[in-house]
């Protein structure tokens, strides 16, 4: 195991933990046949996430304002 850890540039203790998890069945890999995202796609998705977070913030503020308006009636 020491040689495998060295060749894989992984700490021996990490390799031992992974082996333990695999034997327990608590470490599994995700089977997904989708190709990895391109850099441009990642950039586009990050921009979309930022836009959605901004919109969520605006909607949260609107809800808070409406709650206060109802409370003051």
Image: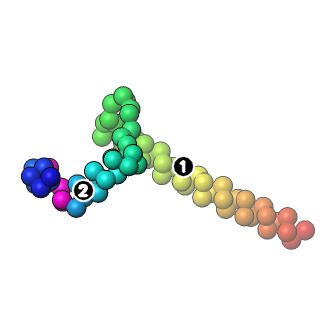
Side of 28 relative to 53 (left or right) = left
* 70 is higher (above) or lower (below) than 44: below
Task: Quickly name the residue at label 2.
Answer: 16
**Quarter occupied by residue 53:** bottom right
Side of 52 relative to 3 (left or right) = right
Disc 2 crowd, CA 10 A, few/some/many (<14, 14-19, 20+): some
* 19 is higher (above) or lower (below) than 30: below
- Viewer-closest of 27 and 48: 27
Residue 10, x across and y down, in percent: 18, 55
> In percent of the image, x 24 and y 56: which residue is there?
16
Task: Quickly name the residue at label 1.
Answer: 52
Circle 1 SS class:
helix
- Viewer-closest of 18 and 41: 18
Does the magenta segment cover residue 18? Answer: no
Side of 19 relative to 46 (left or right) = left
Does the magenta segment cover residue 11? Answer: yes
In this view of the protein, can residue 38 be seen by the observer?
yes
Q: What is the magenta range?
A: 8-12
Residue 15, x across and y down, in percent: 23, 54
Residue 39, x across and y down, in percent: 30, 40
Residue 21, x across and y down, in percent: 34, 51
> In percent of the image, x 33 and y 30: which residue is there?
35
* 25 is higher (above) or lower (below) than 69: above
């Amino acid at each position: 195991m020491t040689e495998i850890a060295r060749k894989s540039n992984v700490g021996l203790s990490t390799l031992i933990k992974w082996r333990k998890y695999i034997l327990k069945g608590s470490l599994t890999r995700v089977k997904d046949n989708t190709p990895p995202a391109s850099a441009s796609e990642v950039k586009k998705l990050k921009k979309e996430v930022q836009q959605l977070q901004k919109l969520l913030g605006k909607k949260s503020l609107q809800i808070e304002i409406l709650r206060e308006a109802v409370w003051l009636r």
